[in-house]
Amino acid sequence: MSHMILAWSVTIAQIMLALAMALAAIRMSRGPRAQDRVLALDTLYVNSMLLLMVFGIRTGKVIYFEASLVIGMLGFVATVALAKFLMRGEVVE
């Protein structure tokens, strides 16, 4: 019984994360300002990171957790660089 509950909850989590990624992609493409697009990109990488983690829970393989860690680090650096570019107009001083 608990295996069935876990399988259903992982499936529902994957569906909800995919829906959240679709909504973030829509906001990123239609955002009225650049700040909205940066926040949507931030949300998109966090959702993709979580989707990989849920997929790792489903399969039981460690490689998905490592890939989500890499996505998290690269997404953080990209968000900081984009925020710095929006504030000052340049990334490297």
Image: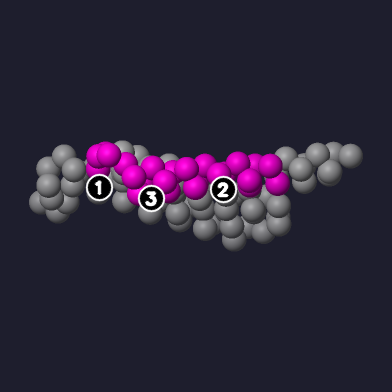
N-terminal label among 1 and 3: 3
Q: Residue at x 34, y 45 (%)?
A: 30
- SS at mark 1? helix
**Of all residues shown, which one is farthest toward the right?**
1
Disc nearest the viewer among 1 and 2: 2
Q: Is residue 76 magenta?
A: no
Element assignment for label 2: helix
Give how far across and how far down residue 56 sits, in percent. Answer: 64, 54
> Which residue is at a point 31% across and 51% down the rendered structure image?
78
Q: Which residues are magenta?
A: 11-35
Q: Where in the figure is residue 86, as x and y percent of width and height?
A: 18, 43
Residue corresponding to mark 3 = 75
Mark pair 1, 2: CA separation: 24 Å
Is residue 70 left or right of 9 when viewed as pictured? left
Residue 66 coordinates in the image, percent (x, y): 54, 56
Mark 1, residue position? 82
Q: Amino acid at mark 2?
A: Ala
Q: Position of residue 48 (x, y in %)?
A: 51, 50
Circle number at residue 44: none
Q: Look at mark 2 in the image and give the residue it sits on.
A: 18
Q: Say few, some or many: other residues with alpha carbon within 10 Å of mark 1 (under 14 / 14 to 19 / 20 or more).
A: some
